[in-house]
Amino acid sequence: MDIDAAGTMQRKDPAALRWKAPVAMVLVQLFQTGLVLLSKVVIGHGMFVFALVTYRSAFGAAFLLPLALICEGGKWREIDWRASRWIIFNAFIGYAVPINLYYNGLRDTTSSYAIVFLNIIPLITFILSLVFRLERLKFATVAGPLKIVGVLASVGGTMLITFYKGKALHLWNSILQHHKDEQTEVASNHLRGTILLAASSFAYACWYLIQSKVHKVYPYKYWSSMATCLVGGFMTALAGIVLRRDRDAWKLGWNLNLLTVVYSGALATAGKYSLNSWAVAKKGPAYPPMFSPLSVVFTVVLGSILLGDSITVGSLLGTTMVIAGLYVFLWAKSKDAAGNE
């Protein structure tokens, strides 16, 4: 039973929660898929990566500001020097570095390939947690060995996608068929893209460890996220100005570049964050990551249909291994968490 603002008792509707939570998580993965596909197109057509990240950060902060004001009021006044240091560090390691690395890796590869690296971040985080002794493996339980199986399957799937192509499967014609030749040219430096994407995933994994410290010194998620967007965007802008002072590289017109920036801030930042926070509050922290493999499926299918990305036997087998490994890992993780309660 819940009490509403008028003081009346209302009964929770578990049936509604059962479908609202999965729908919200499917939307999050669609937001992520749209972000990767749009970003691939605009970067492939020459948009300066640092400009994209800078404008994305500004729009993301603008869309997060109302949420921070509504949900956390004037808690920004509690940002002291200690919290500021951790937010700045978080903005560099967990925001500016991984996003810029990811977009550059996306430029050198394909959307369906790059999305896989976002889905192995929980596994890298787990490995780092073991290294820094933030988590322990319990081999006496079923969950312990299954975590290892999940990690090995996902890493093996990623390596399979990287080093084995196999036969190309021509399942359908691309809607944007004329883009196919451009896509092949953009995705020519596969090795460099793989290194950048792997480095991005490592930095994202470090963000989870740093974020836990940020929450301890400043537990207001919306304000800290908005501050991280602003500081990370400022860092990116400074680096971008040093690299390219051409004003044309920073121009935004009424075109797909502007749509991508607004989409990134509204849906892929504020919308995604809000839905994830709601799901964590309702279903627990292990719930949202369970749906992350859907973004791989969505991106592989839509990337092939819309952009003409190749689907090969290797990519299908590797993607299947990544998804299966991630589900095994998250299932074992949830069992382990339930055992500790």
Image: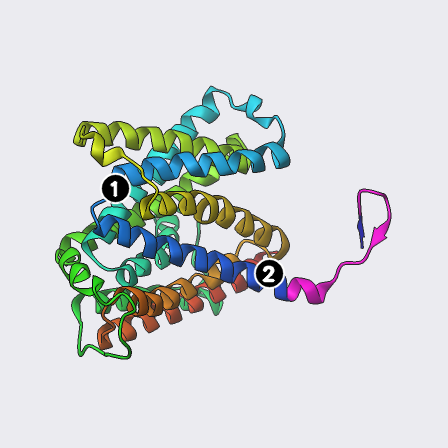
Q: Which residue is mark 1?
A: 49
Q: Are marks 1 and 2 in contact (CB under 8 Å)?
A: no
Is 11 inside the magenta-drawn segment? yes
Segment tinted magenta in the rendering: 4-18
For mark 1, give the secondary structure: helix
Q: Is residue 179 above or below residue 192?
A: below
Q: 110 or 121: which is nearer to us?
A: 110
**Based on the displayed image, in which of its 4 quarters is residue 292 positioned?**
bottom left
Is 331 inside the magenta-drawn segment? no
Q: Which residue occupies 53% across, 31% down? A: 218
21 relative position to 174: left or right: right
**Based on the displayed image, in which of its 4 quarters is residue 314 positioned?**
bottom left
**Residue 79 place in picture, x, y as percent:** 52, 24
323 relative position to 313: left or right: right
Under mark 2, the amino acid is Ala
Q: Is residue 133 above or below residue 308?
A: above
For mark 2, give the secondary structure: helix
197 relative position to 301: left or right: left
Q: Which residue is mark 2?
A: 21
